[in-house]
Image (cartoon, rainbow, N blue to C red):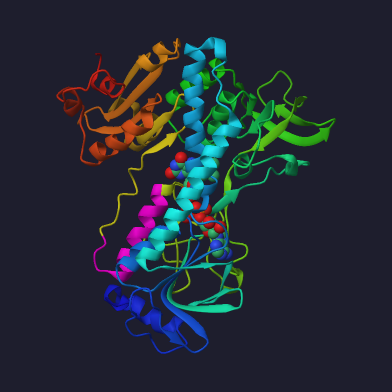
Amino acid sequence: MSRRQGDTGHERQSAYKVSAEPRMEHVPRGKPAKAGPYRQADFVVIGGGSAGVAAAMRAASHGASVILVERDRIGGTCVNRGCIPKKMLSYGASLASILSGCLAHTGGREDWNDAITRVTAEMARLHASYKQRLQEAGVQLLHGEASVVSPGFVQVGNETLQAWRTLIATGSRPTALPVPGGELAATSDDVFGWTGVPASLAVVGGGYIAVEMASILSRYGVKVDLLVRGPRLLENFDETIATALGEALRAKGVRLHFNTDVTMLSQSNGATEVCYRQRDGADPQHVHSLRVQAVLAAIGREPVLDTLGLDALDVARAESGNLRVDRQFRTSVRGLHAIGDVIDCPQLTPVAIAQGRWLADRLFARSSERPDFDVVPTAVFSEPAVGSVGMTEAQAVQAAGSAARIGVSLRRFVSLESRFAGSTIPSLIKIIYNARSQRVLGIHILDNAAPEIVQAMAVAIRLGLRLSHLETTVRLHPSVAEELFGPV
Ligand SMILES: Cc1cc2nc3c(=O)[nH]c(=O)nc-3n(C[C@H](O)[C@H](O)[C@H](O)COP(=O)(O)OP(=O)(O)OC[C@H]3O[C@@H](n4cnc5c(N)ncnc54)[C@H](O)[C@@H]3O)c2cc1C
């Protein structure tokens, strides 16, 4: 089918505007028409990460000719520097945790180098699989760094691409630590290339990446100090769960420092000194210091936009510095779309993928049922893990205008997995519901099974789950999930 089938009047007009050439006729799948000096396509996607690959494959499945430009390894952050290597290392870490409880005499430690070897092998398998799937879908993969020359024209090395639609899916990168000596700190990008682990590590940050890194690395035998600017971990997650996770991490040997401002890093005698102030200490001006073998900064992420040449196009930015888009992922420049970590949205792989597929459906096919971007399940792959979907208690109270309108069910128990490993660290299940209608508004779980449970519960919440549904559903025993349904 031709790209025009997805046109709205607005888009048809912009298609004429962006193209200096006559409009392209229908282009057979995978074989873009050549016209003039340009390589043409219906859709040029910049960035071969979660968002870009999803959009490119879906557009190609609708018959669009697609060029996907990637300057680095295919798969982006998720495959190379994020979800996949992190999750594999966390499997190793939780295995280490169980082993160290059961087989105290062996130390039960996972070996970092062995784990990294397995992670690297999985990445290589994924790179090959992505390339094969893109080829089978008819997407042309172009290796190089892309910049947007003018609406509809993308430069990659010596080659100019002309597209009916251009998609920016260039993702995000770690924010550098803005203090003297900040360049001494590693970031999460570096960790997956480490050939060994440091004996001691200061992790700066309190978000999910900082918490995951602190938890995983401590299970690989690293002595970890976690320096958090705020008064608690995971400020976007439910407070009860975040506090309990903090206690669990402490019990597993991670040292937590809240209300800290890191002021400087310096290096001497092979160690890094971290200077910081503690706002809630006896003397908030007193500068504390910590000597560690390495520092990891995980204080946030910023969009990758600097080499795209967007300033010349005057593309509107949000306050955060991300690209501003409307509900249909259109930037302020006609014909130029943006999705994934470069826009204001939860920075998660499935969100990026859902945006990419939906945008491609809307542009290249008529079908376009918008995914529900409000109910997004999310996890922290710490040990124990956190799974969360829907509103936190604080969000629900704020939305309802009064705590009296909100009900909370909190279950605390020690899981069989923990008992088997000889641990009494409690798991938690917290259900937030509307006190009158009993409709479930949010579910937050602290347990290694949490991520798997909340994925399924996201469907139930979208379908209008009420407490009575939980009470009348027969349980699966023995499981962590059955604790959702009340005391066993
Ligand atoms: C440590 C860590 C752990 C994470 N864990 C999870 C998790 O467990 N679950 C989850 O859902 N999400 C997780 N995320 C978030 C997830 O990885 C991102 O939200 C997701 O990868 C964003 O996809 P994207 O396509 O927007 O960007 P990316 O995946 O970053 O892809 C962008 C691509 O664009 C390329 N690029 C940039 N500029 C150019 C250019 N000018 N020309 C050509 N190519 C260019 C880059 O090389 C990159 O490959 C994690 C992230 C990190 C950092």
* Left or right, 345 with reference to 470: right
Q: Is residue 308 left or right of residue 400?
A: right
Observer-nearest of 191 and 128: 128
Give above or below for 222 relative to 194: above
Residue at (56, 14) in percent of width and height = 106
Q: Which of the 4 image quarters holds residue 259?
A: top right
Residue at (57, 78) in percent of width and height: 159
**Residue 409 percent coordinates (x, y):** 30, 21
- Image: 410 above or below 185: above
- Count of numbered labels shown in the rendering: 0
Residue 234 percent coordinates (x, y):
50, 32
Image point (46%, 55%), residue name: 128
The residue at the far left in this view is 472
Magenta stretch holds residue 430: no
| Picture coordinates of residue 408, whole percent (x, y) | 31, 23
Q: Which residues are magenta?
A: 350-368
Position of the C terminus, as image quadrant, is top left
Q: Residue at x 35, y 67 (%)?
A: 59
- Whether residue 391 is visible, yes or no, is no
| As drawn, 341 above or below 242 | below
Task: Pick the residue in front: 383 or 401.
Answer: 383
Examine the residues drawn in magenta and state their main secondary structure: helix
